[in-house]
Amino acid sequence: MGMNDIRGSRPFPTDKDRQERCKSVLDSYGMTMTDLADLMGVSKAFISATVSGRQLSPATETRIAGLFGLPREAMFPPRTAAEIAHMREAERREKARVARLRAERAKAAGGAA
C-alpha cells in the first residue's frame, strides 16, 4: 500500500508536527522557507506544500533533510493511517470553528448597523 492509499484523497492534511520540525531546523541555520526555496531552485509554494505534508515528494524531502545532514525521517516522519485520519479530523474541526466565527461576526456586524 502506497502513501497515496494511506493518505486518501487530495489535498493531504497539514502535518503540524512536520512543519515544526522543519521550522526548528531552518531556525537553527538562520534560514527561512524562502531561503530554502532559493537554495533548492524551486518555488516557496512548493517548499511550503512539501514541508506541510500537503504534497508528497519523497525526493524533495530527502534532498531537504540532506542539506542539513539529517535522515529524511528526522524532518519528515512517516505517518500511519490513524495519524493521517486524526490530522484530517483536526482540519475539519478547525474549518468548522472558523466558519462559525465568521458567521457570528457577520451576524454581529449586521445587527450593529
Image: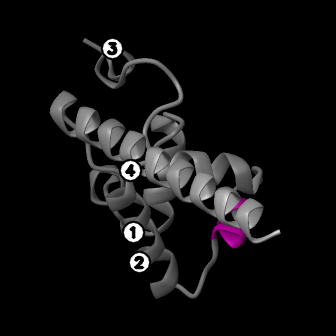
Q: To which residue does mark 2 refer?
A: 24
CA distance separating discs 4 and 2:
14 Å
Q: Which residue corresponds to the image point at 49% horizontal and 51% vertical from the top-left? A: 52
CA distance separating discs 3 and 1:
25 Å
**Along the horizontal axis of the image, is 92 left or right of 41?**
left
Disc 3 and disc 1 in contact, CB within 8 angstroms: no
CA distance separating discs 3 and 2:
29 Å
Q: Amino acid at mark 3?
A: Asp
Single out the mark in the foreground, 3 or 2.
3
| CA neighbours of label 2 inside 10 A, class few (<14), some (14 to 19), many (20+) | some
Q: Secondary structure at mark 4?
A: loop
Q: Give, as a single range, the part of the protein colored magenta.
A: 33-38
Single out the mark in the foreground, 4 or 2.
4
Q: Which residue corresponds to the image point at 62% horizontal and 56% vertical from the top-left? A: 102
Q: To which residue does mark 4 refer?
A: 15
Q: Amino acid at mark 4?
A: Asp
Disc 4 and disc 2 in contact, CB within 8 angstroms: no
Depth order, front residue of 39/75: 75
Q: Which residue corresponds to the image point at 54% horizontal and 46% vertical from the top-left? A: 50
